[in-house]
Amino acid sequence: MQTKLIQIGNSKGIRIPKNYIEQFDLDKGKIEILIETDGIKIKSLSSIPSIETWELLFQQAEKSNEKPENDFFEGIANSIDDSDWTW
């Protein structure tokens, strides 16, 4: 698809066809604009859960026994653990 930049106030913009907006859930909340080496990428953030929903997601995982029995992070260390944390 090719399009032209259009004037929107003091800025410029593009028109995104309705089928693209629906296909990529661009109308479901916030979007992210990423600068890449060969252009710009527009990405929906609707599939990324917000911090407010994390507690609910953890509760649902625990109820469905998806929570790991062992500590997932056991044995994983980094330089910050040794220098910046007081245990």
Image (tube, helix red, strand yellow):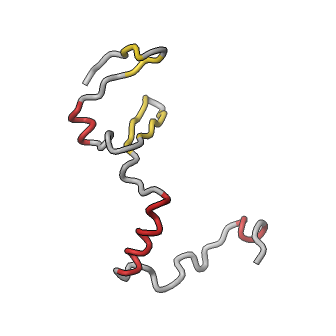
Rendered residue at 37%/83% (across/down): 65
Q: Position of residue 41 (x, y in %)?
A: 40, 35
As drawn, 85 above or below 39: below
User: In which quadrant of the rendered image does the N terminus lie?
Assistant: top left
As drawn, 78 above or below 24: below
User: In which quadrant of the rendered image does the C terminus lie?
Assistant: bottom right
Instruction: Tell how many labels.
Output: 0
As drawn, 29 above or below 70: above
Q: Position of residue 26 (x, y in %)?
A: 33, 40
Rendered residue at 78%/67% (across/down): 83
Horizontal side, residue 86 vs residue 39: left or right: right
Horizontal side, residue 15 vs residue 68: left or right: left
Q: Position of residue 81 (x, y in %)?
A: 71, 70
As drawn, 8 above or below 41: above
* Along the line of sight, the residue nearer the viewer: 60 or 41: 60
Q: Residue furthest left?
A: 19
* Along the line of sight, the residue nearer the viewer: 86 or 52: 52
Q: Position of residue 3 (x, y in %)?
A: 29, 19
| Picture quadrant of residue 63 | bottom left
Horizontal side, residue 4 vs residue 75: left or right: left
Rendered residue at 61%/78% (across/down): 75
Rendered residue at 32%/40% (across/down): 27
